[in-house]
Image (tube, helix red, strand yellow):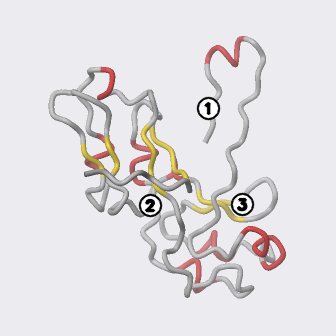
Amino acid sequence: MSMLTRRSLLFGRQATEAPAVRPPWAVPESDFASRCTRCDACVRACPEQVLVRGGDGLPRFVATSGECTFCGDCVQACESAALDASISPPWELNARVGDGCLSARGVVCASCREACPETAIHVAPGARGPAVVDAERCTGCGACVGICPAGAIALSSEPLEMTA
């Protein structure tokens, strides 16, 4: 999600909206828009309240609101086959740590590590480098995104490099 920075605000620039992240188990984007009836059943069914109706009327996942627990309630509520439980994994998202990571700047912080239910994030003791995401363990649930005090974590569908 793109933020409006102080500099952008002062110079009148608008924040750009990040590409929509569809709910887990969403069919490919090319079919999703035609299958989804915009009924909001998946949004209402989500116990974590991380699904919202986007500006295009289609549901989207908002990681800054919390984490997806992959409970499947959204899939069960979807009658239009826009969400398909046979898709595995439920999506191809991974957390990415950006340049603003406090630990990379010498500030002791492990908020992301503490929030990660899969223990996929590692932070060097004593703020000796940025948080590192284990590509094999990260499910892209988003638990680390909203909790990051620096807003340095985002979800991406680009493959992560494997760590040794």
Which element type, helix, strand or loop, lies under badge 2?
loop
Q: CA distance from mark 1 to mark 2?
A: 20 Å
Q: Amino acid under label 1?
A: Met
Q: Nearer the viewer, mark 3 or mark 1?
A: 1
Query: Eyeballing the image, is 75 above or below 121?
Result: below
Furthest-left residue in this view: 125
Q: Amino acid under label 3?
A: Arg
Which element type, helix, strand or loop, lies under badge 3?
strand
Q: Position of residue 37 (x, y in %)?
A: 81, 77
User: Residue at 43% of width from left, 30% of height from top?
Assistant: 150
Q: Which label belongs to residue 53?
A: 3
Q: Amino acid under label 2?
A: Cys
How many residues crowd mark 2 within 10 Å: few (<14), some (14–19), many (20+)?
A: many
Q: CA distance from mark 2 to mark 3?
A: 19 Å
Query: Eyeballing the image, is 36 above or below 110?
Result: below
Query: Eyeballing the image, is 87 above or below 103?
Result: below
In the figure, is residue 34 to the left or right of 44?
Answer: right
Q: Nearer the viewer, residue 37 or 152?
A: 152
Q: Which label belongs to residue 141?
A: 2
How many residues crowd mark 3 within 10 Å: few (<14), some (14–19), many (20+)?
A: some
Q: Nearer the viewer, mark 2 or mark 3?
A: 2
Q: Quadrant of residue 11?
A: top right
Q: Quadrant of the N terminus?
A: top right
Q: Position of residue 105 (x, y in %)?
A: 33, 21
Contact, mark 3 vs mark 1 (Cβ under 8 Å): no
Q: CA distance from mark 3 to mark 1?
A: 19 Å
Q: Which residue is mark 1?
A: 3
